Amino acid sequence: MNAPSAQLSVPLYRLAHSRSGDKGNTSNLSLIAWDEACYAVIREQVTAARVAEWFACRRPARVSRYELPLLHAMNFVLEDVLDGGVNNALNLDAHGKSLSFRLLDLPVQVSAELARRLPGIPGDHPPPA
């Protein structure tokens, strides 16, 4: 009988990169996985509800997720998160680019095998128990 594979918590940037845009009070965050295995993890764990929770401090009115499986990507639309809009906000950190970096800090669980082959700083996750 095989023992279950140890799971490690790693930041999302180890599995994907992001692009962003903002229009008015809406931020658009794309998440592009490095490969198919990374996309499978992201598709399972990075839900609209989890992104809404991760950005709770910005109080999004709604978070929608759109999947682009042929590109191993997804797009998140966060409504009412930019303090009224980029041109109206005094808070420069509310721009979409800053929010995309915040998204990439979201922790996800991966197998030890996948973690070993992910790009990033070696040792930036705890060893398996």
Image: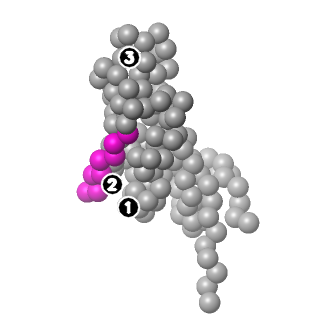
Q: As displayed, is residue 70 above or below residue 60? A: below
Magenta span contains residue 26: no
Residue matched to label 2: 72
| Quarter location, residue 36 | bottom left
Badge nearest the viewer, 1 or 3: 3
**CB-based contact (under 8 Å), mark 1 and mark 3:** no
Magenta span contains residue 68: yes
Question: Tag 2: residue type?
Answer: His
Q: Residue 84 carries which label?
A: 3
Q: Which mark is residue 36?
A: 1
Identified at 47% across, 56% down, the residue is: 45
Read off the magenta span: 63-70
Q: As displayed, is residue 36 above or below residue 79? A: below
How far is mark 1 from mark 3, CA to CA? 37 Å
How far is mark 1 from mark 2, CA to CA? 6 Å
Query: Which residue appears farthest toward the front when viewing the image?
Result: 61
Crowding at label 1, few (<14), some or many (≥20) Cα neighbours within 10 Å?
A: some
| Quarter location, residue 88 | top left
